[in-house]
Amino acid sequence: MSTRLDGQRVLVIGGSKYLGEAIARAANQAGAHIVIGARDLDRAQAVAAELGGIAIRVDVSDEASIAAAAGELDAVDHVVITASAHHNVPVVELEKDKLTAAFDAKVFGPLLVAKHFAPILSASGSILLFSGVAAWSPGAPYTVMGVANGAVAFLAAHLAKELAPIRVNAISPGIIDSGTYDGLGADAKHGLLDGIAAANPVGRAGTREDITDAALWLLGAGFVTGETIHVEGGARL
């Protein structure tokens, strides 16, 4: 990527693992000063130390932790939020606390991040949210995931209008080999990714670089706001 973020401070909430960590590393390579925000402060500190950045505890389901993080950081150029909490069960088996957690991660938490961080974001800065392809591909038992991810697209548009000139955008990934499927075991993981590759118009599953390229572009795209960028190889088709 040619996008440069020299001297800019980028907070990645969820930056201690998977796509969040990949984005933090890519932004660091692009010249940004990195802040890793996560519930697991030890893991966040380990990643931040590698990048010459700092770590801070942020739990998107806990407004006090969000407010404390904003107060501690004082000034930020970009905030990336990759948090998620899955509740993939049939509707007849829904549990209220897990349903709330799913929307905390995708909707309520990001709204509270906007509440506390908008006052300290630079006017040329941005917030980058994460949606997901499930929003555009209805199917059981992913109703909660689909609706929560779909809400992110509306959230990006509404926040972009209200927080202007701060930009707000979202990325909607498809199935990405981000590390989240490693726990399935090698055979099961390769079977999953091969199946995705066969179904996608581009003929492959996604990579970390697909997401980090899109993320860095959006952080630097000063004339793009309120958009949801689909990075899923045409999966919606």
Image (cartoon, rainbow, N blue to C red):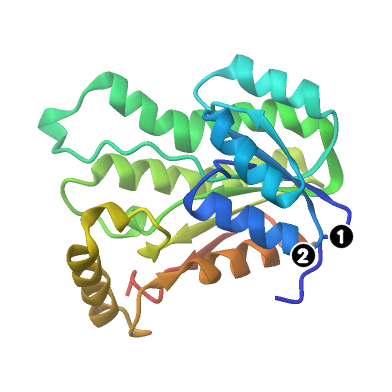
Q: Secondary structure at mark 2?
A: loop
| Position of residue 55 measured from the top left corner of the image (x, y, whole percent) | 68, 34
Q: Quadrant of residue 136?
A: bottom left
Q: Secondary structure at mark 1?
A: loop
| Position of residue 82 measured from the top left corner of the image (x, y, whole percent) | 52, 45
In the picture of the structure, the residue carrying the numbered disc 2 is 30
Please name the residue shown 13% across and 38% down the image: 90
Label disc, if present, on residue 50 of the rendered structure: none
Q: Amino acid at mark 1?
A: Asp
Residue 217 seen in the current view: yes
| Position of residue 117 measured from the top left corner of the image (x, y, whole percent) | 74, 31
Q: Residue furthest left?
A: 92
Quarter of the image for the N terminus: give it: bottom right
In the picture of the structure, the residue carrying the numbered disc 1 is 6
Please name the residue shown 48% across and 68% down the image: 231
Q: Are marks 2 and 1 in contact (CB under 8 Å)?
A: yes
The numbered mark, 2 or 1, whose residue comes first in the sequence reads 1
Neighbour class for label 2 at 10 Å: few (<14), some, many (≥20)? some
| Position of residue 119 measured from the top left corner of the image (x, y, whole percent) | 81, 29
Q: Amino acid at mark 2?
A: Ala
Residue at mark 2 to residue at mark 1: CA–CA distance: 7 Å
